Image (cartoon, rainbow, N blue to C red):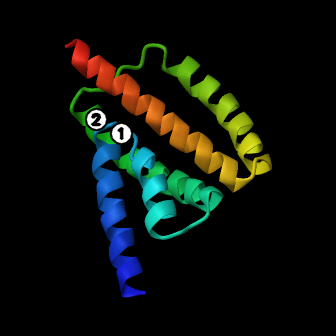
Amino acid sequence: MILDIVLYILFGLISGIFGGLGMGGGTLLIPLLTIFLGLDQKLCQGINLVAFLVMALFSLVIHFKNGYLETRGLLFIILSGIVFSLIGALIAGIIPSKYLRMAFGVFLCLLSLYQGFKALKK
């Protein structure tokens, strides 16, 4: 029980730092929660969404104060994001957690390969 609390705090710290940097804390939070705490993939996605809202709000305020917010095209990103997040949530509700976990793993592997090749080009 105490170890779980320590892990929740540690995982919150890690995902908060990466989320604050704009690198998607959920990319780390979801695997950490599923692998080390054995939580269901869909539950982890829900936890990530709630945590993301809070972290994003604070990060947004700081980025705005530092002048790192570009509003051009923002409306199109927000509107399409809303539409496709609804579609994605509906799809995630239908797909079994096992397949979501595999798809997320494949996504992370492809992302890693892409970033690795991109770094090698430089």
Q: Quadrant of residue 111?
A: top left
Q: Which residue is mark 2?
A: 63
Q: Are marks 2 and 1 in contact (CB under 8 Å)?
A: yes
Crowd rating for badge 1 (residues with CA inside 10 Å; few <14, some 14–19, many 20+): some
With respect to residue 80, does 122 lie above or below?
above
x then y, percent, for residue 97: 68, 55
Q: Quadrant of residue 39?
A: bottom right
x then y, percent, for residue 5: 38, 78
x then y, percent, for residue 63: 28, 35
Q: Is residue 97 left or right of residue 76?
A: right
Query: Which quarter of the rendered picture does the N terminus lie within?
Result: bottom left
Residue 60: mark in rendering? 1
Residue closest to the far bottom: 1
Q: CA distance from mark 2 to mark 1?
A: 5 Å
Q: Is residue 37 left or right of residue 119?
A: right
Callout 1: SS: helix
With respect to residue 31, does 76 lie above or below?
above
The one nearer the camera, 25 or 68, is 25
Identify residue type, mark 2: His
Q: Quadrant of residue 36?
A: bottom left
The residue under the point 30% across, 26% down is: 116
Crowd rating for badge 2 (residues with CA inside 10 Å; few <14, some 14–19, many 20+): some
Callout 2: SS: helix
Total numbered circles: 2
The one nearer the camera, 103 or 13, is 103
With respect to residue 2, does 35 lie above or below?
above
The one nearer the camera, 8 or 36, is 36
Identify residue type, mark 1: Leu
